Amino acid sequence: MGLDVNRLKELGRRLGVSGGGGVSRTDDTDLPLDHQLTFTPNHDERWTYRGGRVFLNDTDVRELVCEEANNVGVLCGVSQGLCEYQNHVWEKGGKALADFNGAVCCIQDRISGRLGSIYDGLTGGVRFECDGDDFWINNVNVRSVLNLYRIKPTDKARRYLFGLQEKLGLILSRRQSSTRYDGVRDRARKLYSEIEAALGQVPADAPLCLVDGRRSA
């Protein structure tokens, strides 16, 4: 049976995310690692690794992070839980388990990216994330909107695309620097230029400019 949201929030509190007190742990330090690398820090919390994936009870942690992508308490709780799990495995002599360590690192990177996007959204009014060629702003896939405009340009779509371009401009104007953010900046700059080029195609239903009779840009 998988974990519900309340159980996940409780996990966050147990790990200190919400400032709650800790609970007693199951003393399994004398038990050897089994083939699933089982870790049971609490009677109703069980971490395992099987099939190249990490599970919290019967919940795939990678899928859990996707489902709770905007829940800071859950993300932080899972991240700290993963740290405890990995430390447990290492203390048992599992530092050389490349597949396990790679799986944990991949999940932690995803959590870090999500928390970074949430922070950016809270501080700048624009929540964004990117995956490959796709770039989302406030849950809108900018590239999808751009591609639709190229296929069927309308004045309404043009105005919407202008708004997305302005938000990309806000992202590019921020003066922070990090490995993650610099990568996002490069993608945002490329997408901004693509939108600029696409907006050069004025839709047939665009309103006329009152000055010289030409359609507005």
Image (cartoon, rainbow, N blue to C red):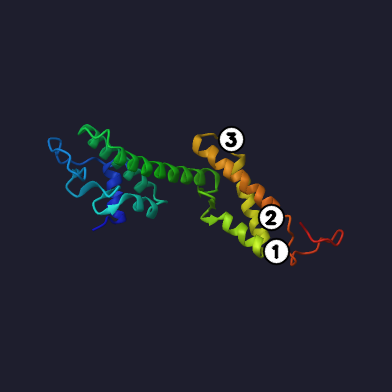
Q: Nearer the viewer, residue 75 or 73?
A: 75
The location of residue 54, given as percent across then percent down, is: 29, 47
Q: How many marks?
A: 3
Residue at x 69% of width, y 65% of height: 154
Q: Amino acid at mark 3?
A: Arg
Quarter of the image where one finds residue 79: top left
Would you call the spot at circle 3 few (<14 residues within 10 Å), some (14-19), or many (20 or more)? few
The location of residue 110, given as percent across then percent down, is: 41, 45
Which label's residue is closer to the chain start, 3 or 2?
3
Would you call the spot at circle 1 few (<14 residues within 10 Å), some (14-19), or many (20 or more)? some
Task: Work out whether 32 lies above or below 44.
Answer: above
Residue 59 appears in the picture as rendered: yes
Would you call the spot at circle 2 few (<14 residues within 10 Å), some (14-19), or many (20 or more)? some
Task: State the quadrant of the C terminus.
Answer: bottom right
Query: SS at mark 3?
Result: loop
The location of residue 201, given as percent across then percent down, is: 73, 58
The disc label shown at residue 175, or none: 3
Which label's residue is closer to the chain start, 1 or 3?
1
Quarter of the image where one finds residue 199: bottom right
* Residue 30 as seen in the image, left or right of residue 149: left
Could you tell me how far apart the alpha carbons at marks 3 and 2 are, in whole angstroms? 27 Å
Q: Amino acid at mark 2?
A: Ala
Q: Nearer the viewer, residue 189 or 78?
A: 189
Which residue is denoted by mark 1 in the rendering?
155
Q: Residue furthest right?
A: 212
Which residue is denoted by mark 2 in the rendering?
198
Which label's residue is closer to the chain start, 2 or 1?
1
Quarter of the image where one finds residue 31: top left
- In front: label 1 or label 3: 1
Residue at x 22% of width, y 32% of height: 91
